[in-house]
Amino acid sequence: TIVSKLQAGQLPPDLGACRQELLSCLARFRAGPSAVRRQLVVALVDCQLWQPPAQDAQWLPDSIGVLSEGGAEAVPCLLELLAVIPEEAANRKVMVDSQRRSAFASSMLMHTAAVFDALCNAAQQSEAAAIAALTACSRWLHLQNASPAMRVQKRSPGGKFSADIIKQGLLKETPLMSRAAQVLAGMGGVQSSLELCRACANLLSEAIALTNEVTGL
């Protein structure tokens, strides 16, 4: 498959053209079968991992822009992309070197605020979209551990650490965090699906893991 070839480094002659074709396919078939959509999204991210780091900065905003077009029909595809990026950034099957992997993760983390906004907007479409958005957000929080600053903090003598998104108040301001807390707090009242409760619990768990200091997150 195209995913296995890209992960193994069996690259097409023109990576840029391949990336654009994958993005176009996603835009055209975003309402297609979920398995096909996921393969296209994974291939798109893996393709970007083989691109020069200088191209990372604009790639994510451009991709979000393209996949945000089309209203509610485009939401599953966008959520798939935002969930897959953290996965592939840590996927050792993609045979890029560790320096490139680290550079890609750092570049993606620079867009955390924009990603949170996109996820919050998508989560309003339906409960299924909310579950997918919460799951993607959890993975994005886990990606924060790839930050060089976090690694330095964890190796420091005092052992205290807090992710930048906590220090900057970005995580606390994210509506998805409030929604997760409200869903779990209301489990004894308004009935929520097990999937939604699980997604909320996973998000809060990832958030707590981003600091060992006393904070309101």
Image (spheres, grey):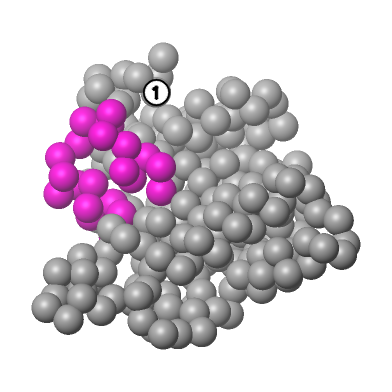
Instruction: Give 61 or 8, whichever is nearer the viewer.
Output: 8
Q: How many marks?
A: 1
Residue type for callout 1 = Val
- x and y percentages locating residue 11 in the rendered image: 27, 23
- x and y percentages locating residue 70 in the rendered image: 73, 46
- Dot 1: within a 10 Å radius of its alpha carbon, few (fewer than 14), some, or many (20 or more) residues? some
Q: Quadrant of residue 201?
A: bottom right
- x and y percentages locating residue 34 in the rendered image: 64, 28
Please give the residue where the numbered disc 1 appears in the rendered image: 3
Q: Quadrant of the N terminus?
A: top left
| Drawn side of residue 56 relative to residue 215, left or right | left
Q: Residue at x 67, y 70 (%)?
A: 181
- Residue farthest along the right direction in this orientation: 190
| Drawn side of residue 34 relative to residue 138, left or right | right
Instruction: Give 112 or 160, whichever is nearer the viewer.
Output: 160
Magenta highlight on residue 98: yes
How would you classify the magenta stretch by its main secondary structure?
A: helix
- x and y percentages locating residue 73 in the rendered image: 75, 42
- Residue farthest along the front direction in this orientation: 188
Q: Is residue 137 above or below residue 157?
A: above
Q: Quadrant of residue 98?
A: top left
Q: Is residue 19 above or below residue 65?
A: above
Instruction: Give 172 or 100, whichever is nearer the viewer.
Output: 172
Q: Quadrant of residue 80?
A: top right
Magenta highlight on residue 186: no
Magenta residue span: 86-107
Instruction: Give 44 or 181, whichever is nearer the viewer.
Output: 181
Q: Residue at x 48, y 67 (%)?
A: 207
